[in-house]
């Protein structure tokens, strides 16, 4: 067993889905490795150019539906494994993923190269880049 605990960051995007499949493949059948499929939810107002930007009410309804679909997929993936769990965190995704990895002694983080899109990345920064820079855990970025 190479890893004891793998964290797969999941946001519902296609790169995250590929990363989840890669993480499951790394575990193999009955290897005893724990997989935590982690999704971080952040709906707090953001600052762009010094101005606070709060999402419209319709955004929160969309977010709730999207998060429910993500949680169903996470539970499906984790439930198929002997040592799998689905975890929803609240806060900035990059910070929450790195903090979870430290707190729960994750051996490897597997995540997609891009999540919600280029515009969000330009405005808020890359989650994968932040995680790579702010954790001592090896990070596998899946394209």
Image (cartoon, rainbow, N blue to C red):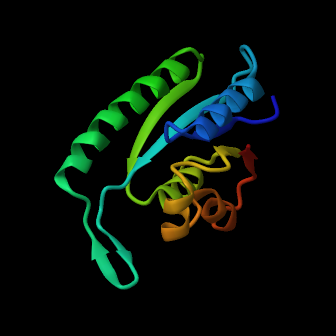
Q: Is residue 88 above or below residue 77?
A: below
- Quarter residue 54 falls in: bottom left
- Quadrant of the image containing the N terminus: top right
Horizontal arrangement in the rendering, residue 8 relative to residue 75 (left or right): right
Residue lying at the far front of the rendered structure: 119
Task: Residue at 71%, 55% (x, y): give it.
Answer: 137
Q: Is residue 49 above or below residue 44?
A: below
- Quadrant of the image containing the C terminus: top right
Task: Residue at 71%, 45% (x, y): give it.
Answer: 108
Task: Residue at 50%, 40% (x, y): give it.
Answer: 38
Residue lying at the far bottom of the rendered structure: 50
In the rendered image, residue 130, in percent from the top left (x then y), is placed at: 61, 65
In the rendered image, residue 41, in percent from the top left (x then y), is placed at: 38, 49
Say which of 124 and 23 sits in front.
Answer: 124
Residue lying at the far right of the rendered structure: 2
- Quarter residue 121 falls in: bottom right
Residue lying at the far left of the rendered structure: 57
In the rendered image, residue 97, in percent from the top left (x then y), is placed at: 53, 53
In the rendered image, residue 127, in percent from the top left (x then y), is placed at: 57, 58
Say which of 142 and 48 sits in front.
Answer: 48
Q: How many marks?
A: 0
Task: Residue at 75%, 36% (x, y): give it.
Answer: 3
């Amino acid at each position: 067993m190479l890893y004891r605990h793998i964290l797969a960051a999941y946001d519902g995007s296609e790169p995250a889905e590929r990363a989840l499949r890669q993480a499951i493949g790394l575990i193999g059948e009955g290897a005893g490795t724990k997989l935590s499929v982690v999704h971080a939810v952040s709906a707090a107002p953001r600052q762009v150019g010094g101005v606070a930007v709060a999402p419209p009410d319709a955004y929160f309804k969309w977010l709730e539906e999207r998060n429910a679909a993500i949680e169903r997929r996470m539970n499906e993936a984790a439930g198929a494994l002997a040592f799998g769990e689905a975890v929803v965190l609240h806060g900035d995704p990059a910070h929450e993923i790195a903090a979870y990895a430290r707190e729960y002694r994750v051996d490897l983080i597997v995540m997609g190269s891009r999540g919600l899109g280029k515009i969000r990345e330009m405005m808020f920064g890359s989650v994968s880049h932040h995680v790579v820079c702010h954790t001592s855990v090896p990070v596998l970025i899946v394209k």
